[in-house]
C-alpha cells in the first residue's frame, strides 16, 4: 500500500548497526529494513549509523540519498580511547558506555550540521539519539521526532546507576517526542505504571523482509538439521540446546545442530557438549560475515531455535525478538521458550512450539517437530503463513498512516 504523503518528505534516521568486513552484518538490526523501505518512498533520506561496541568497525557514518540515489557520504573519526579498549565488553562499564554515548551525540550533531535543510521526520533509535534529535528539533533542523525503542526493559542494565539513567532518559524522551515506536504493548503498559500515559505510542513489531520470504522445496531440505543464530552469552540460553541434546539424539540419532554466532560462553558450551557425548552432533560455525550465507544455512534447516532465558524483566520479555521472525520467513517452524509475547501467537498459529526453559520440555518439542514428516510439513506451511503477516512494508505503511492521520 503506497503512502503518497511520504513521497515529498525528507526523512532522517539515526540508528545503531553492526558491521563486518565493511558491511552491515546479520546483527545490524531492523533499521536496515527501514532504510530499504524509505529509499523507494521518500524524496530524501539521511541515514546515520553508529556501530555497536563489538562491531569490527566503530566509525560512525551518514549517507544522504536524494530520490533513492546516494548523494554524499560522511564519516565521524573515532576516539583513540574507543579504538584501544577491549571488545566485545567495551560498553559493559559505565566509563565505556559513557564514551560510546558521547560519540553518538557528537557524531549526530556534526552530521546534521553538514547536511543542508530541514527534515520532516527524524527517527531516532534509543534515548541518547532521541535526546540529540530533540535538540535538533529545538534549533529548527527537524520538524518531528519519532522515538524508536528497541531494547526496553524494567531492568535494562545490571548497574543500578545506568539503569536509573536509562529510565530517566526514556521518560524524558517519550514525553517530548512527537511519537514513540514500541516493539510490544508491554512497553506502554510498564510506562503507564510510572505515570507516562497521554503520549502518542505505536506498536512496531519486528518484521520480515518481503524480498526474502520463501522456503526451499522439501527435497532440498536437511530434515535432521536444526539451527541457532545469535549470541552465545548468558542471556541467550544456548546452554539449553546442549543440555537437551542427549534426549533428542536418543529419538533422532542423525540430528545435527548448527550454531551460528559467538560470545563469552562459546568455550564452556563446547566443553559441555563433549562431556555429554553430543559434540559430534553440533557444528559451531562462529560468526558468519556474509548475511546471504547465514540465510542459506537457515533455509536448508528443518527447525529454528530461540532458547531465551525465563526472566520477566529481561529485554526479551518486553520486546519482539528478531530471531523467530527470521526463521519463519524461510518457512522454518520455531522452537522457542515462553519468554516473549510472540511465543503465544507462534503456538496458537501452529507455526512452532513454546516451551519452558527446561531441557526435557525443550527436547520433547524438538522431537515432536522433527520426528514426523507430515507434521513438519504442516508446521512449515503455517510458519510461512505467519511470517507474511509481519512483512516490513505492511508494518511501516501502517505506522506512517497512523501518524499522518
Image (cartoon, rainbow, N blue to C red):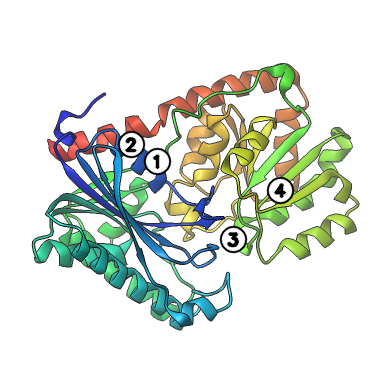
| Left or right: residue 28 compared with residue 393 | right
Q: Mark 4 = which residue?
A: 259
Q: Is disc 4 surrounded by few (<14), some (14 to 19) or many (20+) residues within 10 Å?
A: many
Marks 1/3: CA–CA distance: 25 Å
Q: Name the residue under label 3.
A: 235
Mark 4 vs mark 3, foreground winner is 4
Which labelled disc corresponds to residue 33?
A: 1
401 left or right of 181 in image: left
Q: Earlier in the sequence, mark 1 or mark 3?
A: 1
Name the image quarter holding residue 306. Answer: top right
Left or right of 318? Residue 121 is left
Quadrant of the drawing holding the N terminus: top left
- Along the polypeptide, which appears first: circle 4 or circle 3? 3
Q: Quadrant of residue 130?
A: bottom left
Residue occupying image coordinates x 51% and y 76%: 83
Circle 2 — which element? helix
Q: Dividing the picture into quarters, in which one does residue 59 lie? A: bottom left
Q: How crowded is mark 2: few (under 14 residues within 10 Å), some or many (20 or more)?
A: some
Residue 363 point in image, percent of width and height: 75, 41
Residue pointed to by mark 2: 37
Amino acid at each position: 500500500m503506497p503512502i503518497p504523503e511520504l513521497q515529498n518528505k525528507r526523512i532522517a534516521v539515526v540508528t545503531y548497526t553492526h558491521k563486518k568486513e565493511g558491511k552491515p552484518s546479520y546483527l545490524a538490526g531492523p533499521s536496515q529494513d527501514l532504510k530499504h523501505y524509505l529509499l523507494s518512498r521518500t524524496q530524501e533520506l539521511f541515514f546515520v549509523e553508529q556501530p555497536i561496541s563489538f562491531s569490527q568497525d566503530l566509525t560512525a557514518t551518514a549517507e544522504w540519498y536524494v530520490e533513492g540515489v546516494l548523494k554524499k557520504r560522511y564519516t565521524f573519526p573515532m576516539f583513540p580511547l574507543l579504538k584501544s579498549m577491549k571488545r566485545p565488553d567495551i560498553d559493559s562499564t559505565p566509563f565505556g558506555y559513557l564514551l560510546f554515548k558521547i560519540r553518538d551525540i557528537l557524531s549526530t550533531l556534526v552530521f546534521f550540521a553538514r547536511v543542508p535543510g530541514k527534515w520532516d521526520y527524524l527517527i531516532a533509535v534509543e534515548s541518547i539519539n532521541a535526546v540529540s534529535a530533540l535538540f535538533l528539533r529545538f534549533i529548527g533542523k527537524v520538524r518531528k521526532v519519532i522515538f524508536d525503542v528497541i531494547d526496553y526493559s524494567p531492568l535494562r542494565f545490571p548497574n543500578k546507576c545506568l539503569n536509573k539513567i536509562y529510565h530517566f532518559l526514556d521518560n524524558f524522551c517519550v514525553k517530548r517526542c512527537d511519537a514513540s515506536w514500541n516493539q510490544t504493548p508491554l512497553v506502554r503498559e510498564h510506562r503507564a505504571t510510572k505515570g507516562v500515559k497521554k503520549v502518542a505510542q505505536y506498536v512496531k513489531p519486528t518484521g520480515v523482509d518481503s524480498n526474502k520470504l520463501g522456503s526451499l522445496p522439501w527435497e532440498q531440505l536437511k530434515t535432521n538439521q536444526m539451527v541457532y543464530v545469535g549470541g552465545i552469552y548468558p542471556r541467550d540460553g544456548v546452554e539449553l540446546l546442549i543440555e537437551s541434546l542427549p534426549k533428542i539424539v536418543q529419538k533422532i540419532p542423525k540430528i545435527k545442530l548448527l550454531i551460528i554466532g559467538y560470545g563469552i560462553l562459546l568455550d564452556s558450551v563446547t566443553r559441555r557438549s563433549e562431556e555429554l557425548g553430543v559434540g559430534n552432533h553440533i557444528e559451531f560455525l562462529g560468526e558468519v560475515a556474509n548475511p546471504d550465507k547465514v540465510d542459506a544455512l537457515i533455509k536448508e534447516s528443518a527447525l529454528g531455535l530461540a532458547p531465551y532465558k525465563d526472566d520477566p524483566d529481561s529485554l526479551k520479555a518486553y520486546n519482539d525478538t528478531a530471531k523467530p521472525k527470521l526463521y519463519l520467513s524461510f518457512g522454518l517452524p520455531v522452537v522457542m521458550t515462553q519468554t516473549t509475547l510472540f511465543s503465544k501467537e507462534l503456538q496458537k498459529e501452529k507455526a512452532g512450539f513454546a516451551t519452558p526453559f527446561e531441557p526435557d520440555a525443550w527436547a520433547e518439542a524438538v522431537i515432536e517437530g522433527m520426528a514426523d514428516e507430515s507434521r513438519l510439513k504442516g508446521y512449515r506451511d503455517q510458519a510461512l503463513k505467519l511470517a507474511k503477516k509481519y512483512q516490513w512494508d505492511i508494518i511501516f505503511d501502517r505506522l506512517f498512516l497512523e501518524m499522518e492521520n
